[in-house]
Amino acid sequence: KIAIEPKTKADIDKMAAGLVKLAQEDPSFHFSRDEEINQTVIEGMGELHLEIIVDRLKREYKVEANVGAPQVNYRESISKITEVRYVHKKQSGGQGQFADITVRFEPMDPGSGYEFKSEIKGGSVPKEYVPGVVKGLEECMSNGVLAGFPVVDVRAVLVDGTYHDVDSSVLAFQLAARGAFREGMRKAGPRMLEPIMKVEVVTPEEHLGDVIGDLNSRRGQINSFGDKPGGLKISNR
């Protein structure tokens, strides 16, 4: 993904119209507004794809824009099962806050996303407080502990907990879930995930060396070679 901003006020409407049209034509292209950095962010299948999008904005829609450096959409996950107990307790006059939960974090297969499961038995955490745990965990899944990238392929299991008749609330359990997430992710062997794509390249034989060199420079793993009309086919990821 890259950040892109119109150079002048006259380019604002032209860029908006161009982005909408290009997104309609190309399902693999997306754009959004990042309010934190106050910029428009475009996302695609890779650096070349985004270069083509920017070029089309300039040629077809006459948009002059400032374009940032490409950024990779990393993800974060975990490498081992871990179980943590987290107690949220706060007393500052009047009604306090109390929530005690035990959560097990489990790695899942690639592409599984995120899953929540409750194994609570006997009412150790009343049903009305479980949504607080769910919300607290889901809020944290968009911001991993390594570099702030979204967390994927993780199952969070609510194993046990305790509550207070007066001081417990949905909010208290929500805050406890946030604390359990931060502690659990650090102990579960957090790791970065880099996007991988499978591609096929067809090239004349005389350019084979240059193509292989380019793929290797981008850490591509070549799986097979094959003949194809017009040249050689290289399958890699």
Image (cartoon, grey):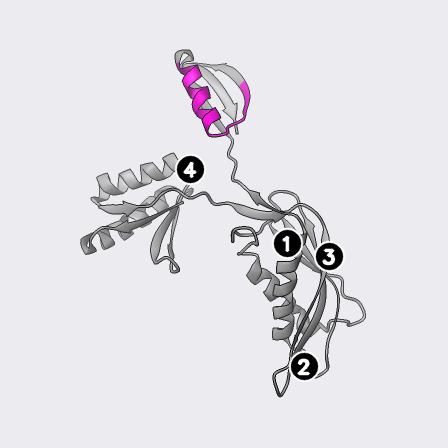
- Label 4 sits on residue: 46
Residue 186, disc? 1
Of the pair 232 and 195, the residue shown nearer to us: 195
Q: Earlier in the sequence, mark 4 or mark 2?
A: 4
The amino acid marked with disc number 2 is Asp
Cα distance, mark 1 to mark 3?
A: 11 Å
| Kind of element beneath mark 1 | helix
- Label 3 sits on residue: 83
Confirm or deny contact between disc 1 and disc 3 (CB under 8 A): no
Cα distance, mark 2 to mark 3?
A: 25 Å
- Label 2 sits on residue: 167
Q: Bounds of the magenta span?
A: 207-224
The amino acid marked with disc number 3 is Glu
Q: Earlier in the sequence, mark 2 or mark 3?
A: 3
Q: Is residue 21 magenta?
A: no
Q: Residue furthest right?
A: 122
Cα distance, mark 4 to mark 2?
A: 51 Å
Graded by Cα atoms within 10 Å as few (under 14), some (14 to 19) or many (20 or more), the crowding at tag 4 reads some
